[in-house]
Image (spheres, rainbow, N blue to C red):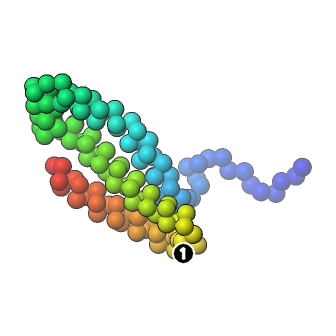
Amino acid sequence: MNKKRPVNLDLRTIKQPLPAITSILHRVTGLALFFGAFFMLYALGMSLESEQGFNAAAQMLTESFFAKLIAWGLVSALLYHFFAGIKHLIMDFGHCEELESGQKAAKATLVIAAIAILLAGVWIW
């Protein structure tokens, strides 16, 4: 069988359209939220052990640069995942599935998520 299509298996050279990038980022942020939940469960467990544990968890989340960075990363992932999920729900109802409207929806998702992430960064830091 002679196939005339070129085979390109190098993913670094394939130019993805913007809607595909936002969809991939939606999946990546879902994974980040799953693994980041372990950190938040650790902080929750520490805060529920005793009053000293609560104070230690509160101090960790307010004074530790690393803890703030993780918290901001998790909130950022949550915000992007939320807005991209809304875009996917809208697409599930049959809207923004055409090329032009899909591009606009992807751009709007990125802009809205970026603004929300910056506001969350100001709030956390």
Using residue 25 as the reference point, say whether residue 6 is left or right of it. right
Q: Read off the residue under disc 1.
A: 100
Q: Residue at x 23, y 32 (%)?
A: 43
Q: Residue at x 17, y 54 (%)?
A: 123
> Could you classify mark 1 by the number of other residues whose Cα lies within 10 Å: few (under 14), some (14-19), or many (20 or more)?
few
Can see residue 21? no
Q: Quadrant of residue 15?
A: bottom right
Q: Amino acid at mark 1?
A: Glu
Residue situated in front as seen by the camera: 79 or 48: 48
Using residue 124 as the reference point, say whether residue 98 is left or right of it. right
Q: Residue furthest right?
A: 1
Q: Quadrant of residue 95?
A: bottom right
Residue situated in front as seen by the camera: 16 or 122: 122
Count numbered badges in the picture: 1
Where in the figure is residue 7, as x and y percent of width and height?
72, 51
Residue situated in front as seen by the camera: 24 or 79: 79
Can see residue 1? yes
Where in the figure is residue 10, as x and y percent of width and height?
62, 47
Where in the figure is residue 64, as x and y percent of width and height?
16, 36
Q: Residue at x 50, y 70 (%)?
A: 103
Where in the figure is residue 60, as x and y percent of width and height?
15, 33
Using residue 1 as the reference point, say whether residue 68 is left or right of it. left
- Vertical comparison of 11 with 59: above or below: below
User: Is disc 1 placed on a helix, strand or loop?
Assistant: helix
Q: Quadrant of residue 61?
A: top left
Using residue 72 as the reference point, say whether residue 7 is left or right of it. right
Q: Residue at x 29, y 32 (%)?
A: 41
